[in-house]
Image (cartoon, rainbow, N blue to C red):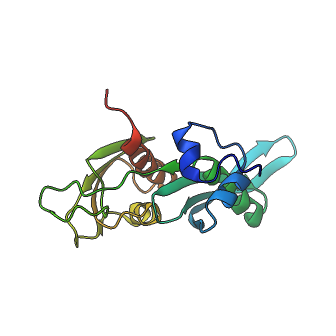
Amino acid sequence: MEGKITSIKDVFEQNIPIKEPEIVDALIPDMKHEVLDVSIVQKQTDAGEITKFKIGVVVGNGDGYIGVGIGKSKQMRFAIDKAVADAKLNLTPVRRGCGNWECPCGQPHSLPFTVTGKSGSVRVTLVPAPKGIGLVGGAVAKTLLTFAGIKDAWVVSRGETRTTINFAGAVYEALKNTYRFKK
């Protein structure tokens, strides 16, 4: 609000934590979200069972920023709002490039190199593809890669990918690893 930070790029360059989802709304106005998974969870109490909705959501601008979040509430609308707020707090930049040796274009349409991610039993490897291949992988992976702004990639997955939240978490971790240092 004071004008000290003018772009989301400054936030990640200075390694400032995002503590309010309204910061993301102010810095990236064209942020979109999509519901990935809806499940019903129950908790046993002495008076009976409490049923809640558990929602998984992805947010992104299609230009290098993506977040994944989970929200629970008794009403679906509130669960979606909580999940979107959580996803905005978990926003991460995604490095894009043209990392395939077959593609000489040099435009940022794919990944710069092969990355892996793991969540639960799901292990995902994202491999850069030449221009025109498209996104080759499951529906959840295609959604996350589209929200990150990646147009061409191969997705190799192992584990129980029917668990949508873990599959989305593994793809998110792989995209997050595009900005990690190699050990």
Residue 122 appears in the figure: no
Considering every residue shown, the one lying at the far front of the view is 3
The picture places residue 24, in percent across and down from the top left corner, at: 65, 55
- Is 173 located above or below residue 131 in the figure? above
Answer left or right for 155 relative to 22.
Answer: left
The picture places residue 84, in percent across and down from the top left corner, at: 66, 58
Quadrant of the snapshot with the C terminus: top left
At horizontal 64% and vertical 57% (from top left) the residue drawn is 27
At horizontal 24% and vertical 56% (from top left) the residue drawn is 128
At horizontal 69% and vertical 54% (from top left) the residue drawn is 85
Answer left or right for 138 relative to 114.
Answer: right
- Is 14 located above or below residue 26 in the figure? above
Considering every residue shown, the one lying at the far bottom of the view is 132
Residue 137 appears in the figure: yes
Residue 82 position by quadrant: bottom right
The picture places residue 175, in percent across and down from the top left corner, at: 40, 49
Considering every residue shown, the one lying at the far top of the view is 183
- Is 31 located above or below residue 70 in the figure? below
Front position in the image: 161 or 97:
97
Front position in the image: 41 or 115:
115
At horizontal 42% and vertical 66% (from top left) the residue drawn is 146
The picture places residue 16, in percent across and down from the top left corner, at: 61, 38
In this rendering, the count of numbered labels is 0
Residue 25 position by quadrant: bottom right
Considering every residue shown, the one lying at the far left of the view is 102
